[in-house]
Amino acid sequence: MNLKEYLAARIERVERALERWVPPETMAPETIHRAMRYSLFAGGKRIRPVLCIGAAEALGRTPEGIEDAACTLEMIHTYSLIHDDLPALDNDELRRGRPTNHVVFGEAMAILAGDSLLTLAFEVLGKLPHASDGTKAKLVIELATASGTAGGMIGGQVHDMEGEGRPPTAELLEAIHRAKTGALLRGSVRMGAIYAGASPEQLQALSDFGTHVGLAFQIVDDILDVEESSETLGKTAGKDQAQRKITFPAVYGLTRSKIMAESERLAALEALTPFGPGADPLRALADYVVKRKA
Amino acid sequence: MNLKEYLAARIERVERALERWVPPETMAPETIHRAMRYSLFAGGKRIRPVLCIGAAEALGRTPEGIEDAACTLEMIHTYSLIHDDLPALDNDELRRGRPTNHVVFGEAMAILAGDSLLTLAFEVLGKLPHASDGTKAKLVIELATASGTAGGMIGGQVHDMEGEGRPPTAELLEAIHRAKTGALLRGSVRMGAIYAGASPEQLQALSDFGTHVGLAFQIVDDILDVEESSETLGKTAGKDQAQRKITFPAVYGLTRSKIMAESERLAALEALTPFGPGADPLRALADYVVKRKA
C-alpha cells in the first residue's frame, strides 16, 4: 500500500470535519475562534484521527461519519498542546515552527482556547450524525478517560511535572508515558474500533496495538528531542534534558531506547495478527511512527 | 415550603454524588485529585445542581440518579472559577473565603485541575447509571453548548475580557451576561428538564425560567460586588469597578439595577405558571437568587 496517498486521503477527510465543526473566525466572539483555529490548523500530522479511522478500516469497513468522531481526538490533542506550552507549564514559544498560542493571543485567551477545544470535542461526540446514542455514550467515556487524571493524559502530565529533577527510574518513566501520550493514542485506536462496532476480542487486540504504538511513539519522541534540531522538529529541541525530564534516553541511553522502540513496533504488528489486509494502514502507521524524523 | 430544609436535602444528595465521582485524594497522581477536591468542596452554594434537580421535580418526579447529572454542573462551574481566578485572567487570590487554587497548588496544577474537572463532567454524563443513551447524548450536548464559545459560558467570558475599559453599553452588557453566567444557569434548568423527559412545551417554559433566573442572578452579583464587603462575599469585592468591567450598576446605576433584578424574578415566576406546586422549589430559588447577600 502507498502510505502517503492513504494518509493524504484520510487527513483530507479529517480537515474537512474540523472545518465543519469549529465555529468560523467570523463568528462572535471572533478572538476565541481565531485562537482555536490558529492552533488547530497549524499543520499537525493528525496521527490520532488517522489511527482512529485506520482502526475502523482494520475491521473491514469505513463507517460513515468516522471522521467526525476522529476529529475530536485532534481537538483534545491541540488543547493539551496549547495548555502545555503556557508559561506556567512548559513555557514554550515555538510549536510546529510557529509562535505558540499564548505568544500570539495572550495567556488568558490561550487558556480559554484550550478550554473551548476540550468542550467542543464532547459537543461533537454528542451530535455525531451517523452514530447510535449507545455509540455516542461509549465514545464520550473513552475520550474522557483517555484524557483524564486516572491513567489518562492529564494524569501522565502531572506525573511528568512531579518527576522533573527526580532520579530517572524505569517505574516512573512507565507511569508517565503510558498515560501522557500513550493513553490518547490508545484511545484513538479504541474509538475507531468502538465506532465500527468491534467485538470484545477485536477491541482487545486493537487496544494492545494502540498501547504498543503509543509507547513506540513516546520513545521516538524522546529520542528526537535529543537527536534533532529545533528547526526539524518545529519546536524547541533539547528541552527534556534542560528540564531534567524523565525520558527513555535518560533512563536507558540512546542505543537501548532505539531497540525498545523497534521492539514496541514489532509488538504492535503482532497484535494485528488476527486482522487481514484491511489492517495494512495500521501496520504502515506503526512503521511511520518509529521512522519519522519530527 | 421550607426552602432551607429543601436546599439542605438536595445539596446533601449533590455532595454525595460529587464524592462518588471525583477520584479520592489517595489515588495517584495525588496532587491533581487534591487540587480538584480543594475547589470542589469549598462550601459552594450548589445553585446549579439544585436548579437542575428542582426543574426535574417541577415536572412532578424525582428521577433516580438526577444528582449524578446535576453534579456535573458543579464540576463545570468550579473549573471555570479555577481558570478565571488565574493571574492571566482575573488574578484573584480569594474565593469562598479561602486562597484560590493556584495560590495553594501553583498555576500549572490549577490549570490542569480545571481541565480535569471539565473532562470529568463529560465522563460522568457518559456513565450515568440510570439514564438512557439518548438522554446521555442530549445532556452532553446541553452541557457542552452551555459552557462553550457560541453563546455559552466561555463566549461570555471572552466578551467580558474584551469589554474591559470600553464604554459600557446595554448591548455589550447583554451579550456578556446572557452568556457568561446566564447560559450555564439556563443549562442547569434545561438539563433537569431533559433528564426528567420534559415535553417540548415544558422544556421551553423551563428554559424561559432559566433565562430570567440567570439574568437576575448576574444583576444581583454585580450589585453585591458594589455593596458588600470582601468578607461577606468570600471573594475580593469592588473588583468590577477596579477592572472597569461592564456591569449592570455601571450601565444603569444601582437603583435601576435593583428594579431590573426584581423584574427578572417576576418574569421567572411568570414562566412557571403552567406548573403546579411541584415547581414551588424553583419559585423559592428565584426568590433566593435575588435576596441573597453573597
Image: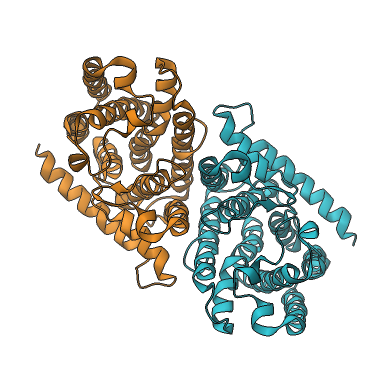
Chain colours: A orange, B cyan
Taking the image as shown, residue B186 lies to the left or right of residue A229, namely right
Location of residue A1 (image quadrant): top left
Position of the N terminus of chain B by quadrant: bottom right
Left or right: B283 as drawn, with respect to B115: right
Residue A187 in picture, x, y percent from top left: 38, 36
A193 or A2, nearer to the observer: A2
Q: Quadrant of the C terminus of chain B?
A: bottom right
Asked whether the viewer can see residue A22, the reply is no
Is residue B16 positioned above or below A102 on the image?
A: above
Residue B184 at x, y = what percent?
Answer: 61, 62
Furthest toward the left, the residue is A2
- Residue B214, can we see it? yes
Q: Residue at x 63, y 69 (%)?
A: B242
Left or right of residue B179, residue B248 in this image? right
- Which residue is located at x 31 percent, y 24 percent? A212
Q: How many marks?
A: 0
* The quadrant where residue A30 appears: bottom left
Residue at the extreme right of the image, as rendered: B2
**Vertical side of A217 occupied by B200: above or below:** below
In the displayed structure, would residue B204 be above or below residue A149?
below
Q: Taking A166 as reference, is A198 left or right?
A: left
Q: Position of residue A140 (x, y in %)?
A: 47, 45
Percent across and percent down for residue B203 are 63, 68
In the rendered image of this protein, does residue A115 appear above or below residue B168? Answer: above
- Displayed quadrant of residue B49: bottom right
